[in-house]
Image: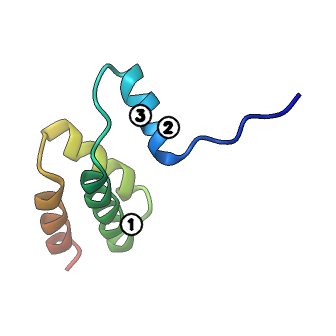
Amino acid sequence: MTTPPPLTGADWLARFAAALDTKAPSPAVIDQLLDLAGAAAHGSERIAAPIACYLVGVTGMDPDQALTLARTIAH
């Protein structure tokens, strides 16, 4: 019996989004969120990265605006 190959990030996100009954983010939004996560992680502890992205989702803030804000917080 062969093991199926692991899912790509895009495939995993598409399945997770479908399970949440929503659409997966676009590649551009994914890049923005990754940049935000990087700014949060480099500006403090690693825990800030996923929680910052969570807060963007909860508030509905544009990820690009959140990245600009995040960069001001670390300085």
For image coordinates 20% across by 36% down, the residue present is: 58
For image coordinates 41% across by 20% down, the residue present is: 19
- Which colour scheme appears in the figure? rainbow
Q: Are marks 2 and 3 in contact (CB under 8 Å)?
A: yes
In this rendering, position of residue 9 left or right of residue 23: right
Identify whether 56 is placed above or below 73. above
The residue beneath circle 1 is 41
> Percent from the top left, x then y, of residue 53?
29, 49
> Percent from the top left, x then y, of residue 29?
25, 52
Number of marks in the rendered image: 3
In this rendering, position of residue 36 left or right of residue 5: left
In this rendering, position of residue 51 left or right of residue 13: left
Q: Residues within 10 Å of mark 3 (few under 14, many from 20)?
A: some
- Mark 1 or 2, nearer chain start: 2
The residue beneath circle 3 is 14
Q: Amino acid at mark 2?
A: Trp
Q: Amino acid at mark 3?
A: Ala
Looking at this view, is 14 or 69 the one in front?
A: 14
Q: Residues within 10 Å of mark 2 (few under 14, many from 20)?
A: few
Badge 3 element: helix
- Mark 1 or 3, nearer chain start: 3
Q: Which mark is residue 18?
A: none
For image coordinates 19% across by 80% down, the residue present is: 75
The residue at the far right in this view is 1
The residue beneath circle 2 is 12
The residue at the far bottom in this view is 75
Q: Work out how far the residue at label 2 is from the one at label 3, CA to CA, in angstroms.
A: 5 Å
Identify whether 12 is placed above or below 17. below
Q: Are marks 1 and 3 in contact (CB under 8 Å)?
A: no
In this rendering, position of residue 15 left or right of residue 2: left
Looking at this view, is 12 or 58 the one in front?
A: 12
